[in-house]
Amino acid sequence: MKIGLFFGSYNPIHIGHLAIANYMVEFTDLDQLWFVVSPQNPFKQKRTLLPDYQRFELVNQAIGNNYKFRASNIEFNLSKPSYTIDTLTYLHDKFPKYDFVLIMGSDNLENFHKWKNYEEILRYHEIYVYPRPNTKENDLINHEKVKIVNAPIMEISSSFIRKSIKEGKDIQYFLPEKVYKYIKEMNFYEK
């Protein structure tokens, strides 16, 4: 089984994430996509994050019972900060029959050479890259393990969602309905 791993803070998950995920499972050879909720991205400040379990719940609310999607909290019990190579090693040990593929935006590919043991990741895993606005081409785009996926360009970001909520804007159509209701009910991002 070929599993796409879509890592993210999902602070919060939004329709852009879901559109990319949907495209990946419908227009590539992936059998399933796992939204891996990262407790702490080494490149992001933790103070801006909702608690781990809240973001995990938002992802579960967003995907509902879609059998092609799965919310994963696998990194919650691994050492922090979260490094992709460590997560991949753990997943390979736990699910040896699965073929794991990384899913990332072209903006992340720009900085991939800064990731811990990135050469090791490329040796054993494919990377499916979707386009992001205003990204530069780099040498990795031609790597044999890197596959460019012609998914639609999404210009929605979680930081835009958080800022808009804080400013009192109605952004209900940027979020899955259940996620929007949960965020409103819990008063997330209002302060």
Image (cartoon, rainbow, N blue to C red):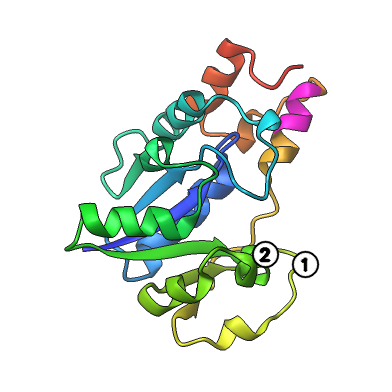
Tell me which secondary structure the magenta stretch mostly adopts.
helix
Earlier in the chain: of badge 2 and badge 1, it is 2
* Residue 108: image tag: none
Left or right of residue 45: residue 116: left
Which of discs 2 and 1 lies nearer the camera? The answer is: 2
Look at the numbered discs 2 and 1 and tell me whether their residues touch, using CB distance below 8 Å: yes
Mark 1 residue type: Asn
Element under label 2? helix
Quadrant location of the C terminus in the rendered image: top right
Q: Work out whether residue 173 or residue 136 is closer to the camera in this orientation and state it.
A: 136
What residue is rendered at 39% in x and 32% in y?
Answer: 60
Q: Secondary structure at mark 1?
A: loop
Q: Which residue is mark 2?
A: 107
The residue carrying pointer 2 sits among few (fewer than 14), some (14 to 19) or many (20 or more) residues within 10 Å by Cα, namely some
What x and y, as percent, mark residue 140? 59, 82
- Classify residue 111 as left or right of residue 53: right
